[in-house]
Image (spheres, rainbow, N blue to C red):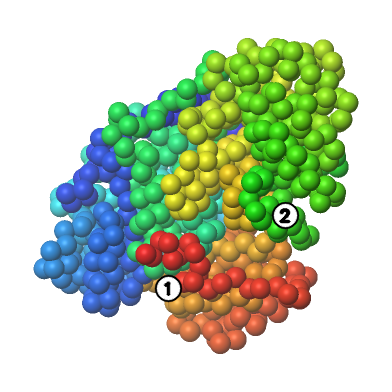
Amino acid sequence: MDRLFMQTVQSYCKDPFRYQRRKTREVKVGHVGIGGNNPIRVQSMTTSDTMNTRATVEEALGMVKVGCEIVRITAPTPRDAENLRNIRDELRKRGCNAPLVADIHFLPKAAMAAVEFVEKVRVNPGNYADKKKFAIREYTDSQYHEELERIEEAFTPLVRRCKELGRAMRIGTNHGSLSDRIMNRYGDTPLGMVESALEFVRICEKNDYREIVLSMKASNPKVMIQAYRLLAARMNELSMDYPFHLGVTEAGDGEDGRIKSAVGIGALLEDGIGDTIRVSLTEDSVHEIPVCQELVKPYNLPPDLRRTSVNISFSTLEKRDPFVYSRRKTREVHLGDLAIGGENTICVEIPVCLRERRAVDHIRAITTGADAVAEVIQLRVENEEDCSAAEKLIAEFPGDLFSIDLGVHAKLLDAVPKSGIHKLILEAGMSWSPADLQKLLHLTQEFDFAIQMDIADGHLTQARDFFAAAQRKNFTQIIVGIGAVQSFLPVAAYRMLAAFLDSEQLAFPIHLKDRGNFDSELELLLGASKEFGSLLCDGVGDSIQIGDGTKPREALKLAYNILQATGNRITKTEYVSCPSCGRTLFNLQTVTERIKTKTAHLKGVKIAIMGCIVNGPGEMADADFGYVGGAPGKVNLYVGKECVEYHVPESEADQRLIDLIRKHGKWQDVPEGWVPPAPLKQSAVAASVAS
Ligand code: SF4
């Protein structure tokens, strides 16, 4: 990493263990303030053709009605930009005062026209006034400087006009559309994204214009998290305090789109970074708002209700590098043939409620299949009857791995089944006496169990004593978790646990579990995605557990979807699809659904579906295949970053895409009995959001 940035490694957030929002200046977008002491704002973008005034106005009104605070509208040409006047007038006439933002790519002329009619202009530093794209060339320092002068000349009139009219501006960097000069000097890295924005910020500051909001979007949550963190660190170093607009681009639709957004945006909100957010879904724009609202809810609470610190204290320092992904180093723990920790994939453990009438069916459902199954089934026992019920249940599934959660019930050690069990879980606390812990160690060695110790506040000494006793007995089959997670800020608590273990040179794998107290399906979906996603993107966590045992099938699906969104386990086809906007050259929702129906059975293939070329090849960088709007009714097909078929009629494009997948050896025939995913509109997630 660049030495300059090494100096700022820990300066991206004030305290990784304590929530504190990054201090920023307030930027006014019409009457709505972003940054400063304002709540984190939620916003979205229309998908209608900007030349269709009626459709755009109706869409904007619908968005505002469900709580959208700022409305963005694309202005691909000066003509569209001019039509923003009609859209604004009609909205104001109908009593809607939501600030409008013009979204500009490529054309300074469109920006200069739009700025007259909207409260904010968004420019993309990667393509503002840059005609050429994706050229590979070396820039000498003087050539680079000449490029910057050219940009300054093209960009300064907009800056001056924004200043004259009191307009705000977003300098919105996209990972997928960095300029050639940035790509050639920095590559498509988080560092390149930050420098791309700074080139434009410097021009603004030269003109004494500071009504700026910055963004660093990417479709890969890890890249996006690192870029925003790096930007925050760089802002601190340069004494700049511009607010940030957060978003994961091309997140897709349905549950996957929500999970990806929650992972990227949520991780940064946990860091105290972010002043306004947009969730980009390939769905109707109104569906984005409830997701945004749910994500910002905990951070917009009044200070006296907001949880800011964890009630667990390990008093330790963090050594994690927040700008580069690396998995925390741990030793392997073995549960039968399953290895957890080390270089092994993140293990999925699913609780099943013993007292459920359908416990047997539940276990069968989550353990059947070739992959994406529960690798460990967890049973929680609270009394001797539970222990007998567990024994019977385990006997029905001789080939599966079980863990038993004893929690605080040390007295059940004698009653707990000894056969078919691979891990015993306990919650450190007064109920576990030193004699109980000795007995536990004895049992584990006799019956070859692993132990998971969940540490709770005030019981660190007990955990330390236990680790020392285990070490004396040469027992290393230990996994560590956090007890009573619901009372903590989980991300901060697990970060602290990882830092504590590392500082004590205890390379135990960490088991992550969701905090369990979610009020709705959406809150669980977004909360678990944010909390696990944030930790997994930082390399913390070797096994995960979701759910309270009553809905194990749903918990299993969510667990694997989170692992896929964080790039940890790829168990199904991955889609990168843009949210669509007035530039879109085909119906994104219909096409995405259609392609999913035909390809969702492919494992480990990544397909990008993009409405136009603006973010095309860049965002598709790690996609295997791309389906991109090339012209009205025409599609360009990509293999990796390379366009291999131009202007394919839309009616032939699906089959030609399948042919390409086949040609590149990634096609599999549809397995017998395979059920294609339900169309989005019928899915539970969309229904809950739309209601
Ligand atoms: S990639 Fe999609 S959302 Fe982005 S500008 Fe093109 S059509 Fe609009």
Q: Amino acid at mark 1?
A: Thr
Residue at image position (55%, 30%) is 484
- Kindly indicate the quadrant of the structure image that contains residue 48: bottom left
For label 2, the residue is: 360
For label 1, the residue is: 584
Dot 2 alpha-carbon crowd within 10 angstroms: few under 14, some 14 to 19, many 20 or more: some
Left or right: 164, with 179 as reference point: left
The x, y position of residue 228, in whole percent, is 46, 41
Dot 1 alpha-carbon crowd within 10 angstroms: few under 14, some 14 to 19, many 20 or more: many
Secondary structure under the numbered disc 2 in the rendered image:
helix
The x, y position of residue 111, in whole percent, is 28, 61
**Residue 86 visible to the viewer:** yes
The x, y position of residue 272, in whole percent, is 40, 34
Q: Which mark is residue 547?
A: none
Label 2 to label 1: alpha-carbon separation: 49 Å
Left or right: 671, with 690 as reference point: right
Instruction: Give 349 or 61, whichever is nearer the viewer.
Output: 349
Foreground: disc 2 or disc 1: 2
